[in-house]
Image (tube, rainbow, N blue to C red):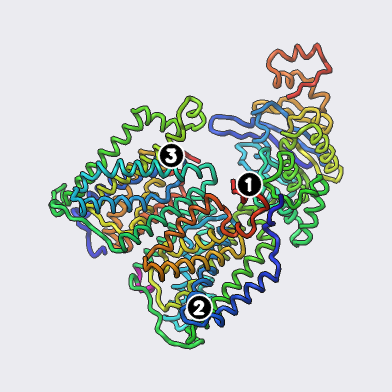
Amino acid sequence: MFGGFVDANIIAAAAINGLLLGGIYTLVASGLTLIYGVLHIINFAHGSMLMLAMFGVFYLLTLLGIDPYLSIFIMVPAMFLFGYLLYKGLIGRLSSGKDENILLVTLGLSILIENLALMFFKGDSRTILVSYSDTMIQVGPAFVPLPKLISFAVATGLCAALGLFIQRTDTGRAIRAVAKERVGARLVGIDVDRIYAISYGIGLATLGAAASLMMPIFYVSPSVGHVFVLVAFTVVVLGGMGSFLGAVIGGLIIGLTESFGGLFLGESMGQIGISLIFILILLFRPSGLFGAKT
Amino acid sequence: MMLQVANLSKVFGGLRAVDDASLQVEQGRIVALIGPNGAGKTTLFACIAGFHAASGGRVQFLGQDITGWPVHKISRAGMVRTFQITQPFAKLTVHENIAVGAYQKFHDRHEAWEHARAVARQVGMEGLLAQSASDLTVAGRKRLELARALATGPKLLLLDEVMAGLNPTEIREIIGIIRAIRDSGVTVLLIEHVMHAVMSLSEHIYVLSYGKIIAQGTPQEVVNNPAVIEAYLGRGSADHAADKPTQVAHA
Amino acid sequence: MTSVSELQPIPWKLHLSVLAVAIAFPFVFPSSFMVNFGVLALFYAFIGQSWNISGGFAGQLSFGHVAFFGVGAYASTIMQMRYGISPWLGLPIAGLAGAFVGGVIAVLSFRAGLKGSYFALITLAFAEVLRIVSNSIGITGGGLGLLIPMNIGAQNLQFAERSGFYFLILALAAGSVAVAEWMRRSRFGAQLAAIRENEDSAKALGINVFAEKVKVMLISGAIGGIGGCFFAQYFLYIDPLIAFGTDKSVEMLLVAMIGGAGTVYGPLVGSVLLALVSDVTRTLTQIQGLSLVLYGALLVVIIAFLPNGLIDLFTRKRGGKPERKK
């Protein structure tokens, strides 16, 4: 663990790695926070859906030879469609009930998805290798695998694109209107149900993108959804439910937490940082950094 | 003096929902709190009963300063409120709903259940005991709110628009029930919009407008008070109303 | 239309019939396979009741109930292996450990005003913290877990005959049913139902919502903890994933919700069904995970159409849809 003084370079390297990972967490969390902000539902299936998308990327590479980064162009629309249809077919029918019912339904979905994956893909972890997997690029004092950099850059770009979409386009404006004031939005002629379906679709589409970006630098197995769920929820809760800026800042903070946690506490204990942050935020500042005060 | 509210204020962000309100309720009386919609009546109730922390002022109940007490403690001390938008225990039966109230007074199941039955009889719900609370009509739910609160054996009942949504027959019945409740020794402070009920039931009235108490007195005094008429009907209407002294404004 | 009264006691005859069937079971089906089936069915009914008491009766949904189970399992196992304390004593020790964790989580979470989905999520995080800690420290055996030395003998809570375990878990499960039934008939249970249905109204009627919620978590935690001790003795092995992994949390929730949250026999119905589905799918198809796929789907379907669980099929109101929680 500590054993003497800690090298500034090692800290810097950990910081850089943390930020790079954080960028992707932001992407994952932005979908979750969008779904909450607009539909006011907690999408517990977020993690398992990311897992599903990652398997998609995996098989697109191993069966069809499609580069994971290029598979974004397939995964994003596919996941959007999946989300849109899932909302129309199931989630939309239940959104009028108690909060907890939706949580339980999405829990049920995550159980379903995870065990379907277990059935079809078996329990082993899978990683992928591409020609540039081992290329290292120097960033300051750290040597970073090229895929990590690419993933970070693309994630950042996509977050920015999503942000612009929400701010500038008509649909984005409609989404913001529905998020803020559903009844009013309906009164000015916005098809609220369609916006709900679109928002849920976008939420899952971000997972499609995140999957393409995660596969080259991580692993996938049917149970990996659990890890993602907690990370995604922590980012969203830290940043503030429904806040896009919060997802960005929160993602970076959590990335750093994971990185430094591993550095100072070791591989096993290091994971505790995220859960502790989650607990502390909920206990002491449930609205998070930028969320609406309840 | 059963209840003394002194200079109570409640501020939400920039809005003064209740502004320096003071009122008193003597033991054994029926006192009404009236005022136009949005005047802050329910907020005032909520502050008195402990659901909101008051931004200023004090509440004294039976000589004790209860300002800042948690809701359940105030309830156990003998002040119980009902809700304007009824909040029944939906999955429980009427009998079970009332029994929850009765359990405050009686710890034994048999006694609580019997007391609940007696209270149901008192408010005319005995036939509905086995019914699920979620199946009740609006009138039924209002009565259930009343019965539940009554079953706790309160000293002071805060009734929030218990007549809203009732038809004239039901209103007549409730008036009788409230009077009987008072006669059995319970003090009543009620928020109400149904004016003729307020006039016939209450011995003293407070009028709230924009969070302030603008008038108080006997029903007759209040009804002829120009400030009250203006609060309900708008500026200048007091002069009109002066031409017709026997008209009573229905909210 | 009348509904089945929720707080009405269940007739003794029903309790005795169920108990009689359960007692007769290992005599009618004495094969090792069937007795194991019975043990697991009763085990999940038992820990499912732990979830049911706080989640079903009091309405406090939890996604991290495994925390109580794991703490109980480790507590009794560590006491046994390090200090030579009898696993029979381990049962109440596990109960106390589970209750303690339940109390801590309850006090922290309810003080902060957490409810509904937020409470469910924070329990998940607490369980995860426990998993990470138990994976990282020595006393729990770290990632390798703890292997209880085989030492057959009733005094070591390691029965030579599987039926020994069966009757133990039957006694425990019957005890949990008794606790649930007592709650239904008591002032405490009525207050919990009120809290579940509408906290503000409950407060207005004099119920100390915070205190009652903490009490119910203490009881729920105790039952979960005892379940952990039993499990450790039955399988003679625990590790961080078994003790604190999300699987048990999911199973506890599923059996209670599918069987009927808030009913006394819901967890038993759910657990027997899950055990049946598990065994059938495993024997017929050899596919890993199929039973949980079905259960996940069942949960979705039930929330959508049978919000009160399968018990609704037994107690459906005459001529109507079951009540929906609104």
Q: Residue at x 67, y 57 (%)?
A: C6
Q: Residues within 10 Å of mark 3 (few under 14, many from 20)?
A: many
Q: Disc 2 vs disc 3: which is toward the camera?
A: 3
Q: Residues within 10 Å of mark 1 (few under 14, many from 20)?
A: some
The residue type indicated by label 3 comes to Gly
C-alpha span from label 3 to label 1: 26 Å
Q: Residue at x 73, y 20 (%)?
A: B227
Q: Position of residue C31 (x, y in %)?
A: 48, 82
Secondary structure state at the residue bearing disc 2: helix
The residue type indicated by label 1 comes to Asp
Q: On what subunit does the disc labeled 2 rest?
A: C
Which residues fall within the magenta stretch?
Answer: C136-141
Same chain for the residues at labels 2 and 3, yes or no?
no
Same chain for the residues at labels 3 and 1, yes or no?
no
Residue under pointer 2:
C90
Could you say which disc has been placed on residue C200 in the image? 1
